[in-house]
Amino acid sequence: MVRQSLKYSNTIFKYFNTTSEYLNTTSEYLNTIFKYFNTTSEYLNMTSEYLNTTFKYLNTTFKYFNMTFKYFNTTFKYFNMTSEYLNTILEYLNTTFKYFNTTSRYLLLI
């Protein structure tokens, strides 16, 4: 009876030992999986930071482009104003020459 009891106890301890080894292995696998998740999370965080920095640079670049286009627009407006001013001067000169021409014809008729 004692022998059978010892044999049964030994089997139970072997079972507990095997279960403990399986649990230990499972814990190691889970630890490895969590390490991979942690590393992946760190890489994603770094990627997010790089993308954030890239978008900041792009935003700044677009702001500079916008400022450049505004300057071009202002420059073209000044060119347009200058052209209109020159056109007005030419119209006045044309009117003046017409006046002189009319006056000269009138004087020739007298």
Image: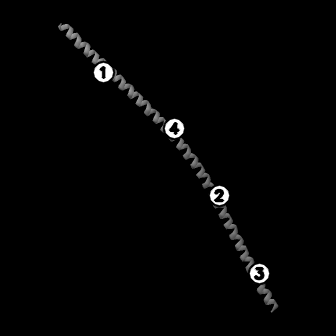
Distance (Cα) linking label 2 and label 1:
77 Å
Task: Give the CA distance from mark 3 to mark 2.
Answer: 38 Å
Type of the residue with mark 3: Phe
Q: Tell which tag, 3 or 2, sits nearer the viewer.
A: 2
Q: Nearer the viewer, mark 4 or mark 2?
A: 4
User: Seen in the image, is 68 located left or right of residue 1?
Assistant: left
* Foreground pick, 107 / 79: 107
Q: Nearer the viewer, mark 3 or mark 1?
A: 1
Residue at image mark 2: 39
Query: In the image, is residue 3 above or below residue 82?
Result: below
Residue occupying image coordinates x 41% and y 28%: 78
* Marks 2 & 1, CB-CB < 8 Å contact: no
Q: Nearer the viewer, mark 2 or mark 1?
A: 1
Reading the image, the residue beneath label 4 is: 64
Residue 97: quadrant of the picture: top left
Nearer-N-terminus badge (4/3): 3
Alpha carbon of mark 3 to alpha carbon of mark 1: how far?
114 Å
